[in-house]
Image (cartoon, rainbow, N blue to C red):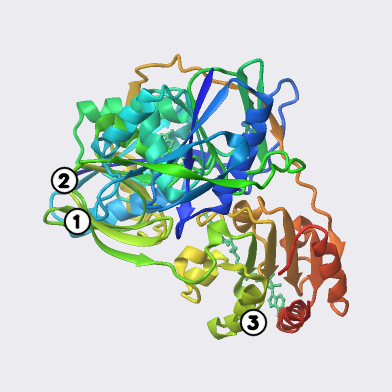
Amino acid sequence: MKILVCISIVPDTTSKITKEESNKFLNRNDLTYIVGPYDDYALSRAVEIKESTPDVEVAILHVGLESSEPLIRKCLALGADYAIRVNGEPKNSIQIANEICHYVNENQFDLILMGKEAIDYNSGMIHGLVAAGLNYNHFSPVMSLKIIKEGIEVQIETDTGKSIIQSQLPAVLGCQEPIAEWKIPSMRGIMTARTKELKVFDMIQDESNFQIIDESVNETNRKQIMIPKDNLNLLLQELKKDIQFN
Amino acid sequence: MINLAVFCDFKQGSLTNNSKSLLNYISILVKKNTNITVNLYTFQEINSCQITNSLHIEKISSYLVDSNVYFSTNASLEQLILHLKGNNITHIFCTKSAINDLICSKLSMILNFNLITNIKSFKIENGLMYFSKSIFSGKALANMHGSSDPCIAIFPKGFSGDLSEKDSEELKDINIERIVSSYISTSKIIDESKIQNEVQLSEADIVVGAGRGLKDPNNWVIIEKLALTLKAATACSKPVSDLNWRPHHEHVGQTGIKINPKLYIACGVSGAIQHLAGVNGSRTIVVINNDPDAPFIKHADYIILGDLFEVVPELTKLLQEI
Ligand SMILES: Cc1cc2nc3c(=O)[nH]c(=O)nc-3n(C[C@H](O)[C@H](O)[C@H](O)COP(=O)(O)OP(=O)(O)OC[C@H]3O[C@@H](n4cnc5c(N)ncnc54)[C@H](O)[C@@H]3O)c2cc1C
Ligand SMILES: Nc1ncnc2c1ncn2[C@@H]1O[C@H](COP(=O)(O)O)[C@@H](O)[C@H]1O
């Protein structure tokens, strides 16, 4: 079985967001980047499946620039077999999805795992776009994944609760906690990752209409009002201005 | 001409608050822009539907697939797509939900419509739509070019646009048109569990969250009492769900649920940046913590410095008295 794990590389939430002095956009150079935390869960599950099932191959795919390669190596250190980087600047969900579809069309995979959402734009759309582009089965957010004779058994969160679904492969899944134990690379993993293959391809299309015209830092200024613990009535009076209690 | 489809969510037969606020907002848009026509769709089983008069809507199209399958492939959407095309739909608006996310991502690819998520604000000027998106876990905003291209816009839960305007509440019954899909899936739902009786976190107007400061899962009774009094949903920090003190689906934050209630009360939560990423969309934040240096203090509207085991029951008592 061939599993493809798609990873996003996103600013760490601890990064301080500032504006570039000279132009209208946010300053992206000073940010610390990480592998999307949901993508980490997806990869961890793929590695678990590889470790417990014979003949499983795990590949990593990232659409992005060369600066992402150290983080791709980190993913290889977790136990994936090889990685693919589609070279170019990721601009929007549809563009990234088209690049992923193109690669998968040429290199058949049975199971494509992604994170539920990337934490830069929190869209949670790419897995659905890819599933539609390839006409594969699609489930998200997936909280547990088992390989069964017929294909897969997944537990998903719905608007009203949870469902367990059995489905055939191929499929695209958006993953979230607690699908796997979060892994950290072992020393041996880090050593072997150095020699694992990292293939680079060019984007099929780079003319996507990038529509953002400017960006700004969102300053939510909270009121910062201290309420003495022996005068909680004051809190209720304040809150009543905004909220109806019944 | 904008031919708008609005995907509406129902829960236990009635329109969710999230869909209500979006529809209210759309009715204000329609009043200002005579070139918008609105078509309603839903993916839930309903028997009746009431919509405000001012939207000039006669029917809602209900699209269901067989109850033991799921919208898992393109084929599951075939009849819906024909219907949307038949109505010459140019734009689709909805609020974020599991089902809408699933369907919209596929429709975007199949219909070749642009896809815009996490919308913070929106306006129409000279026939062009302008969206502003919330990015980097709410820390920044991105403004988009005005466009008249077909698009699917997914608004966050609780989106109400300009709150100062409220539509007349007059409601009327509208017809339900059922679009039946003959789709046969290769996936089967083998088990379903419904969250019952408790207020659902992502839908709640008020959320009471608690963290490791509670010290023991048995102490959650005081949180549950406060939540019950406020008709609020309960939430927790990640370590709390990792320790199995609370169910995983209650964990909010960077790796959990993002909430945007009117009021979030955080008890014994330190306010780590990853937690804030899930709650900074809340309109008002109250923090109860005994550490004046807890990071959450800087991100709160109201701060009560004190022992939560005293403050929470006292607050509950006061609320019960009103
Ligand atoms: C990649 C990554 C992703 C993460 N994702 C998430 C996420 O999605 N959500 C999330 O919540 N966390 C997340 N975390 C963890 C996060 O960094 C914090 O560790 C976590 O939020 C802390 O949880 P807490 O506030 O419950 O516990 P603590 O940090 O232990 O804080 C407990 C608080 O309770 C207060 N307290 C103790 N006793 C009392 C008392 N008697 N009365 C009043 N106050 C009291 C203390 O002063 C303290 O502020 C993530 C971390 C990483 C690295
Ligand atoms: N640049 C990228 N390259 C490869 N996969 C990506 C990229 N961006 C996002 N993804 C995948 O798509 C998932 C959903 O992303 P999004 O729809 O942007 O929230 C992520 O969790 C990743 O698994």
Q: Residue at x 49, y 36 (%)?
A: B58
| First-in-chain label (2 vs 1) | 2
Question: Which of the two residues, A84 or B127, is positioned nearer the viewer here?
Answer: B127
Q: Say the numbered circle drawn on residue B222.
A: 3
In the rendered view, tell whether residue B303 sits above or below residue B41: below
Q: CA distance from mark 3 to mark 2?
A: 50 Å
Neighbour class for label 1 at 10 Å: few (<14), some, many (≥20)?
few
**Do tag 2 and tag 1 residues touch (Cβ < 8 Å)?**
yes
Q: Give the quadrant of residue B106.
A: top left
Is residue A116 toward the left or the right of residue A244 in the image? left
Can you give x and y, in whole percent of width and height, for residue A90 in the image? 47, 27
Neighbour class for label 3 at 10 Å: few (<14), some, many (≥20)?
some
Q: Which quadrant of the rendered structure holds the C terminus of chain B?
A: bottom right
Q: Say the numbered circle drawn on residue A10.
A: none
**Can you identify the residue that label 1 sits on?**
A147
Judging from the image, what secondary structure is the residue with disc 3 in? helix
Is residue B93 toward the left or the right of residue B299 in the image? left
Residue type, numbered disc 3: Ile
Residue type, numbered disc 1: Ile
Chain identifier of the residue bearing label 2 in the image: A
**Can you identify the residue that label 2 sits on?**
A1
* Labels 3, 2: one chain: no
Q: Give the quadrant of residue B303.
A: bottom right
Q: Is mark 2 within 8 Å of ligand 2?
A: no
Can you give x and y, in whole percent of width and height, for residue B39 in the image? 48, 33
Kindly give the residue lying farthest to the left in the view shown.
Answer: A149
Q: Which is more foreground, mark 3 or mark 1?
A: 3
Q: CA distance from mark 3 to mark 1?
A: 41 Å
Can you give x and y, in whole percent of width and height, for residue B239 in the image? 53, 68
